[in-house]
Amino acid sequence: MRAVLDLGQPAAAALARELEATPEAEGVDAALATLGRLGGADATRTLQRFLEGRGPHASAAALALAECPADGVREQLRSTVDDRLADPTTRTAAAAAWIRLGAGNEVRAFVRGVMLAGTPHGQQLEPQLGLPRRPRWAYERYLLQQALRAASGQDFGMDTDAPWDELLAAADRIDAWLKERP
């Protein structure tokens, strides 16, 4: 993808066309990430379509949209976070992108729910937020960890597979930081 990035903005339209034509080709997630880095109207439209379709590459599209702060992107990401029928990983990727775009307060409850999902502390939050019961949430926590690190420069003492009490402490620190965000 380095060669595509080196071509710059002119490559975005061609890459967007290829992704639309062959949405299940090998390397789609990497191509979506590249498209996000290229940016522009073509990139944003294609990424939004992948996210809207809620298919297997919706999470990658959500994460890539953090690079495309165009009109309508924030609203679509926020809508995805709130969509209880969407895959929880896609919802988390949308929350991560929302945080990377400089916001956070509006997704605080969801972030806390993901941080505490699968623990005794999260049992009340899971049904309230439409999160399924499952024992492992490390990947979703990793997505949040990366977004929080990019946005704040810190990781809040977060270990994605930490014991429950450590996850609760990290969730409290993250919640306090997100509360200060717009």
Image (tube, rainbow, N blue to C red):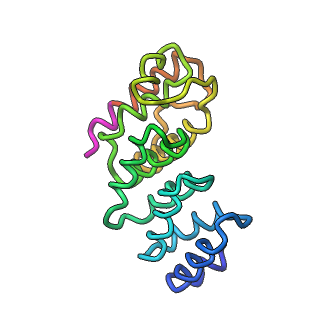
- Give the quarter of the image for residue 35: bottom right
Q: Above or below — where is 62 with respect to 11?
A: above
Write the residue at 43% across / 45% down: 95
Left or right: 71 with respect to 77? left
> Which residue occupies the extreme right position in the image?
26
- Residue 144 at x, y = what percent? 50, 41
Segment tinted magenta in the rendering: 176-182
Write the residue at 54% across / 28% down: 132
> Which residue occupies the extreme top position in the image?
120
Q: Above or below — where is 11 with respect to 46?
A: below
- Give the quarter of the image for residue 89: top right
- Residue 128 at x, y = what percent? 39, 24
Write the residue at 58% across / 30% down: 159
- Residue 131 at x, y = what percent? 49, 30
Marker count (numbered): 0
179 falls in the magenta region: yes
164 falls in the magenta region: no
- Residue 25 at x, y = what percent? 72, 67
Q: Above or below — where is 12 with respect to 174?
A: below
